[in-house]
């Protein structure tokens, strides 16, 4: 009877453990990246094609809204999903498989003609003990100047290359900011790689083989983009490829349309036409917003170690009973 009882416990535990527990647990995930080309806007080739924009970009003085040509340039957003994660010495290796602007240098991918690069985290205290729920954004640029002058046909918010009057009326500040403080509900770290390239003690360093680019440059696009994250022991801890999003146009964002979790389902990645730089993702015409509550207060369940420990204990009891 006892054996049958323990067997029932084992069976119930097996059924109680979601399949995601038995899958990979990711300490850091890709949350969003900007696939919009430099001459286009969110959800349109021109400014007048849509009213969609980014709330962060809209927050700067002189900006009529957050709809900006190029949508901020090359940038992406990570979320820390593990607890007390040490990212010192980690690398983000990126490649745009459909772009062949490489100078012949093979940095990691295996073909030096393909656009590729590496972003390496420095041995800095900022990266030493990251808490679950932290958002980390990387932008190439430190500042983006915006010409907000109406062209007369409704076009405006130009960044490059065609200003209306040759002047800029607003500046989007993308300077490195590590003044985050989770105890005050500030969970956002931001890094400008071009700014860090000129720093005495950079938080990150970059390499790229894109012809004409140099220190501080990296690329994000929609031509078969891949990101691979490796820890300091050169073990891949996360990867995401454009196919996970079902294909992305040069007027779209790539983003996670689910609450962030270490046990995410990559089927929840999607292309979309909303942008939320440094903030929870939104989708379904703005009706759904990511919820970081469980991740930040430590109530993400189930904990795989605990569940599997219970299962192991039950199996151990069963085996002990059989030996008697």
Image (spheres, rainbow, N blue to C red):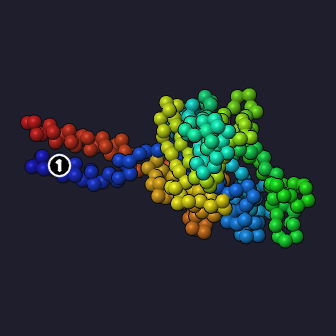
Q: Nearer the viewer, residue 244 or 1?
A: 244
> In screen coordinates, is 6 left or right of 147?
left
Residue at image x 16%, y 42%?
Answer: 318
Residue 197 in percent (x, y) is at: 73, 34
Q: Secondary structure at mark 1?
A: helix
Q: Give the answer, above or below, for where 76 lies relative to 129.
A: below
In the image, what residue occupies the spot 59% across and 56% down?
254
Seen in the picture, residue 70 relative to 128 is either above or below; the reply is below
Whether residue 183 appears in this view of the structure is: no
Q: Residue at x 52, y 60 (%)?
A: 246
**Residue 27's spot in the image, x, y percent?**
49, 42
Seen at 36% across and 41% down, the residue is 305
Residue 23 visible in the displayed image = yes
Compared across the picture, whether 13 is left or right of 299 comes to left
| Category of crowding for the residue at label 1, using alpha-carbon neighbours closer than 10 angstroms: few (below 14), some (14–19), many (at least 20) | some
Occupied quadrant, residue 115: top right
In what quadrant of the picture does the C terminus appear? top left
**Relative depth, front residue between 104 and 63:** 104
Quarter of the rendering containing residue 304: top left
Q: Quadrant of residue 65?
A: bottom right
Q: Label 1 belongs to which residue?
A: 7
Which of 93/87 is in front?
Answer: 93
């Amino acid at each position: 009877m006892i054996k049958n009882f323990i067997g029932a416990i084992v069976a119930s535990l097996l059924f109680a453990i979601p399949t995601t527990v038995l899958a990979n647990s990711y300490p850091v995930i890709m949350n969003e990246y900007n696939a919009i080309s430099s001459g286009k806007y969110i959800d349109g080739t021109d400014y007048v094609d849509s009213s969609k924009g980014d709330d962060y970009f809209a927050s700067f003085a002189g900006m009529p809204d957050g709809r900006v040509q190029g949508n901020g340039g090359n940038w992406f957003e990570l979320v820390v999903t593990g607890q007390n994660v040490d990212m010192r010495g980690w690398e983000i290796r990126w490649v745009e498989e459909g772009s062949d602007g490489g100078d012949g240098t093979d940095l990691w991918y295996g073909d030096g003609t393909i656009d590729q690069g590496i972003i390496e985290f420095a041995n800095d205290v900022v990266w030493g003990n990251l808490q679950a729920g932290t958002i980390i954004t990387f932008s190439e640029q430190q500042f983006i100047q915006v010409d907000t002058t109406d062209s007369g046909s409704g076009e405006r918010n130009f960044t490059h290359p065609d200003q209306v009057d040759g002047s800029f009326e607003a500046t989007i500040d993308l300077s490195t900011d590590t003044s985050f403080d989770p105890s005050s509900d500030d969970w956002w770290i931001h890094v400008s790689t071009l700014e860090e390239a000129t720093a005495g003690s950079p938080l990150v360093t970059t390499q790229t083989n894109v012809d004409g680019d140099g220190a501080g440059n990296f690329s994000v696009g929609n031509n078969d983009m891949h990101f691979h994250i490796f820890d300091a022991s050169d073990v891949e801890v996360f990867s995401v490829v454009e196919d996970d999003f079902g294909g992305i146009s040069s007027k779209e964002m790539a983003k996670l349309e689910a609450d962030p979790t270490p046990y995410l389902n990559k089927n929840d990645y999607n292309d979309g036409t909303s942008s939320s730089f440094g903030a929870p993702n939104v989708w379904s015409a703005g009706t759904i917003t990511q919820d970081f509550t469980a991740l930040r207060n430590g109530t993400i369940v189930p904990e795989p170690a605990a569940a599997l420990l219970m299962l192991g204990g039950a199996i151990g009891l069963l085996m002990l009973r059989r030996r008697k």
